Amino acid sequence: MWKKIRRLFIIKTKFEAFLITYALATGAVARGQDYLVQYPGWGGKMLFLAVTGAVFMAGAKMIEAIELHRSYGSEY
């Protein structure tokens, strides 16, 4: 039973990684818009870029991890 539950939290395909990246990006844009309202000007724009940039870096790492797992198997 625990293996079935654990499977829900394992990303196995690139499609799943893209879906998770999309969900993270949607939340990051919403947070970035709040930053633009709370911190008008240069500071809000930099925070907006920081939260959206972090999503792209996380998405790239997820895709890279999937490719490495396919190449090296479970020992990686």
Image (cartoon, rainbow, N blue to C red):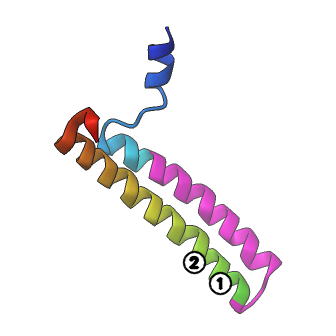
Q: Which residue is mark 2?
A: 49
Indicate the secondary structure of the residue bearing disc 2: helix
Q: Is residue 71 magenta?
A: no
Indicate the secondary structure of the residue bearing disc 1: helix
Q: How busy is the neighbourhood of tag 1: few (under 14 within 10 Å), some, or many (20 plus)?
A: some
The quadrant of the picture occupied by the C terminus is top left
Q: Which residue is mark 1?
A: 45
Disc 1 to disc 2, C-alpha distance: 6 Å
- Nearest to the observer: residue 67 or residue 56: 67
| Residue 70 quadrant | top left
Q: How busy is the neighbourhood of tag 2: few (under 14 within 10 Å), some, or many (20 plus)?
A: some
Q: 40 left or right of 28? A: right
Going 33% across and 49% down the picture, which residue do you hit?
A: 65
Q: Position of residue 22 (x, y in %)?
A: 47, 53
Q: Is residue 22 magenta?
A: yes
Seen in the picture, residue 12 relative to 30 is either above or below; the reply is above
Going 69% across and 91% down the picture, which residue do you hit?
A: 42
In this view, the residue farthest toward the right is 38
Going 74% across and 74% down the picture, which residue do you hit?
A: 35
Magenta span: chief secondary structure: helix
Q: Which residues are magenta?
A: 20-42
| Residue 29 quadrant | bottom right
Q: Position of residue 62 (x, y in %)?
A: 39, 51
